Image (spheres, rainbow, N blue to C red):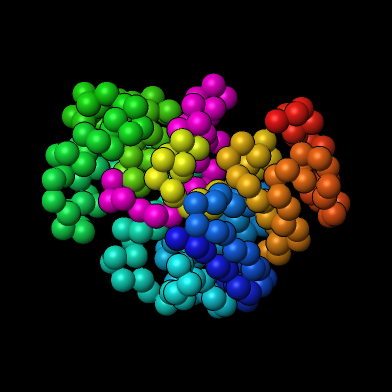
Amino acid sequence: MTIEIDDLRIRFGEHEVVKGISFAVAEGESFGIVGESGSGKSTVLRAMAGLNQSWEGRIAFSGEPVEAKRPPAFFRKVQMVFQDPYGSLHPRQTIDRILSELPLVHGLDGIEKRIARALSDVTLPQSVRFRYPHQLSGGQRQRVAIARALIAEPRVLLLDEPTSALDVSVQAEILNLLADLRVERGLTYVMVSHNLSVIAHLCGMVGVMIDGQMVEQVSVDNLRLGKVEHSHTKELRSLSVELEEPA
Ligand SMILES: Nc1ncnc2c1ncn2[C@@H]1O[C@H](COP(=O)(O)OP(=O)(O)OP(=O)(O)O)[C@@H](O)[C@H]1O
Ligand SMILES: [Mg+2]
């Protein structure tokens, strides 16, 4: 699915926290958003995901603008993965129950098969089905969160800092998994991260946000080459050691 965001504005009371941002993502591409804490990254993703219904501007998937309130079918096609896999998984539900929820809501058949496939897609053993989130490691929990996002065969994943709560070694595994899934399924991603090297690993384009505005959009190739315009992008780049090395 293509994604188009035009002049998106979001306010909380008097405070405008997203100040007219625009970007587009081609089908099967991955767009990264970086920016300092509080710059509005999560707020943008939440509006795209239909979790925040008060915004202005245009959000379109496959060329079709969405309304504030989305029909149930929308939530099959567009799924969000959050930073904290512990907070986003219900603590008193087994993994089996957690993974059953979306297929039940959407009346999908073959739930057993879907769960088995979703677990193997994220390389988790079938035995985790009857465990609870607290009985899994952080990396395993994030794999469950990704399995849940994938289970109803979405076309778009909105990823909000999907690895920042994990150990560095586990981060790389999850990023590789997400990169493989995108190619295999032709998924379209928008991914928020503080970390430019994480973005560079997974995305083709990156948008840099400061205080509710997207001040620059640059390809990851140009980012690596240092062909960036805005001082904030230069600053972020200089903080990211890995980018200095050849790809
Ligand atoms: N529900 C809300 N009510 C009021 N203000 C909010 C709400 N959600 C976010 N904000 C404010 O909007 C601004 C942007 O927040 P947002 O969570 O989008 O930032 P972010 O870029 O994701 O930051 P971080 O990198 O820390 O996750 C902040 O000033 C925040 O305090
Ligand atoms: Mg955030």
Residue occupying image coordinates x 67% and y 35%: 197
The residue sitting at 28% across, 66% down in the picture is: 72
Position of 97 relative to 152 (above/below): above
Residue at 50 percent across and 31 percent down: it is 176
Specify whether residue 17 is in view. no
- In the rendered view, does 237 fall on the left or right side of 191? right
- Asked if 207 appears above or below 145 in the picture, the reply is below
Q: What residue is drawn where x is 24% and y is 42%?
A: 99
- Identify the magenta region: 151-178
Question: Which quadrant would residue 56 be assigned to in this image?
Answer: bottom right
Drawn side of residue 170 relative to residue 97, left or right: right
**Exactly how many numbered labels are in the figure?**
0
- Residue 63 percent across, percent down from the top left: 48, 72
Q: Say if 38 sits above or below 182 in the image.
A: below
Is 44 within the magenta?
A: no
Q: Looking at the picture, how far across and down is residue 220, in whole percent?
A: 70, 44
Residue 14 locus on image (x, y percent): 62, 76
Towards the viewer: 30 or 81: 30
Whether residue 8 appears in this view of the structure is: yes
* Residue 23, quarter of picture: bottom right
> The C terminus lies in which quarter of the figure?
top right
Q: Position of residue 133 (x, y in %)?
A: 31, 32
